[in-house]
Image (cartoon, rainbow, N blue to C red):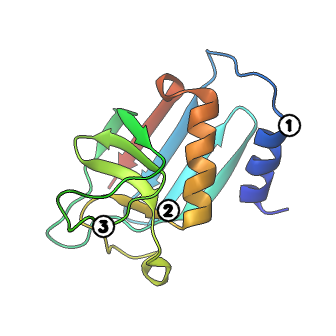
Amino acid sequence: MKLSAMIFAVLATATSANASELIDITVDISEQEMFVQTPDGQVLWTVSTGKEGHDTPVGEFRVQRMYKEHYSRKYDNAPMPHSIFFKDGYAIHGTWDVENLGMPASRGCVRLDPVSAGLLFRTVEYYGMENTVIRVVP
C-alpha cells in the first residue's frame, strides 16, 4: 500500500487525537522531498521549493493559518489549494504544475501534488495546527 494511501486510511478510521501527539513535517530543499511523521505513520513526498532568487525560508516553524482554497494576492491570484502557511506569505500547498515537482520551481512556497496536499491539509486539521511542527532544512 502506498504511504499516502496509508495516511488516508488511518485518517478515515481514526476517532480522536491526543493533544500531545505531533505531526512532524520536514522539507529537505536539497532533496526536494517532504517527510511527514504522524503518530499513525509516515510518508515521503516529492516537492518543489523556491527557484533561484526566491528562497524557501529555512528553520523551524508552526502553522500560522490554513485555507482550503487560497489565491495569491502577490502573484496574479495564482491558486494555492490546501494552503498551510508557516511563515508570513510562505505556505505548503498543492500545485497543478506537477511536472516540475522534484526541482526548485516556486517563488518560495513548498508545492505538493494536489492529492498529497489535500491529505496533508486534512491530517493537520485532524491533529491540530498547534500540534504540527514544520522544519525546512537546506
x and y, in percent, of residue 65 in the image: 38, 35
Q: Residue at x 61, y 15 (%)?
A: 20
Q: Is residue 131 left or right of residue 62?
A: right
**134 above or below 90?**
above
Front-most of residues 46 and 72: 72
- Mark 3 lies on residue: 78
Looking at the picture, which amino acid does disc 1 mark? Answer: Thr
Give residue 110's quadrant in the image.
bottom left
Front-most of residues 77 and 125: 77
Looking at the picture, which amino acid does disc 3 mark? Answer: Ala
Marks 3/1: CA–CA distance = 34 Å
Q: Which of the two discs, 3 and 2, sits closer to the camera?
A: 3
Marked residue nearer the N-terminal end (3 or 1)? 1
x and y, in percent, of residue 101 in the image: 46, 75
**41 above or below 1?**
above
Give residue 117's quadrant in the image.
bottom right
- Mark 1 lies on residue: 13
For the residues labelled 3 and 2, say whether their Cβ atoms are less than 8 Å apart. Answer: no
Q: Secondary structure at mark 2?
A: strand
For residue 44, which numbered disc appears in the image? none
Q: Which of the two discs, 2 and 1, sits closer to the camera?
A: 1
x and y, in percent, of residue 19 in the image: 62, 15
**21 above or below 55?**
above
Q: Residue at x 60, y 59 (%)?
A: 116
- Mark 2 lies on residue: 33
Q: Residue at x 76, y 49 (%)?
A: 8
Marked residue nearer the N-terminal end (3 or 2)? 2
Q: Secondary structure at mark 1?
A: helix
Q: Secondary structure at mark 3?
A: loop
Is residue 42 visible in the rendered structure shown here? yes
